[in-house]
Amino acid sequence: MAVLLGVAHGTRDPAGARVVGELLSLVRAARPELTVGEAYAEVASPSVGEAVRELGYGPLVAVPLLLGRGYHVQVDIPEQLAEAGADAVVSRPLGPHPELAGTLLDRLGEAAQADAVVLGAAGSTDPRGLADVRAAARQLGRALGRPVQFGFVGGAGPVLADVVAEVRRGGARSVAVASYLLAPGFFQRRLESAGADFTARPLGAHQGLARLILRRYDEVGFRVREVA
């Protein structure tokens, strides 16, 4: 059976790494027979190479704990796995996926009834990543039964604070931001300073996210068996 290696972006905030560890603990609890490792694309430890050396060189399915396409998913993680000599396949990122809309609703709680809900994301310079956030906003909008705009606190695209101000000018007396982030840290703090009345906590250690990680693993498992 291929090892599952969850690869998060990485943060200097200890709370972020703690949440990643808690999330992967949920994955292990859901499938005890599966070996599940943890790694970070940058900043934090263990690195991808360190995790590969600890877990063995394959077969391995690397699941990017990222919410859309971009440099880390398309280039960085595959290159780090290749440099480590791993017999590995990289899955799709976690998002966009309808499962995430349910998790976002859970995190919003009663704030989902605000006059306007805006999806807040880190941002990306990759057009594919921007398209993935746009798709996630549509999925959340379907779950809420009303349109959801989106904004970023980094990279290209609409600026979250500007979007929050715009929906207020449009008549919204209460605005909630749904955090389209995996874990707390620098970007979550920027979401919280965008001027909304309520900012949900990140997706974090949630059973829906754990199910989605296993779904991504299962989607590519057959490819690992073919090359093993």
Image (cartoon, helix red, strand yellow):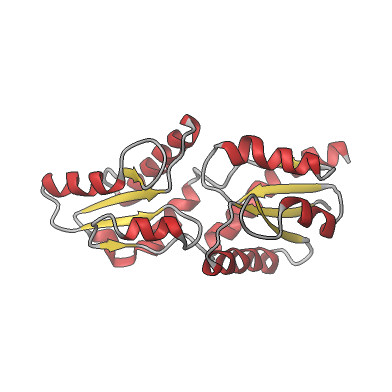
Determine the residue located farthest toward the right in the rendered image.
228
Quarter location, residue 112: bottom left
Residue under the image location 68 percent in, 42 percent down: 77
The total of numbered circles placed on residues is: 0
Residue under the image location 42 percent in, 55 percent down: 187
Q: Is residue 33 above or below residue 72?
A: below
Q: In the image shown, does 23 or 140 lie closer to the viewer?
A: 23
Q: Does residue 16 appear left or right of residue 188 in this picture?
A: right
Q: In the image shown, does 159 or 111 lie closer to the viewer?
A: 159
Q: In the image shown, does 100 or 56 lie closer to the viewer?
A: 56
Residue under the image location 18 percent in, 44 percent down: 166
Quarter location, residue 55: bottom right
From the top left corner, tell me how far across and down residue 143 is, in percent.
36, 50
From the top left corner, tell me how far across and down residue 45 is, in percent.
68, 60
Q: Is residue 97 above or below residue 214?
A: above
Query: Dividing the image into 4 quarters, which one contains the C terminus?
Result: top right
Determine the residue located farthest toward the top in the rendered image.
127
Quarter location, residue 56: bottom right
Residue under the image location 35 percent in, 56 percent down: 191
From the top left corner, tell me how far across and down residue 134 is, in percent.
39, 38
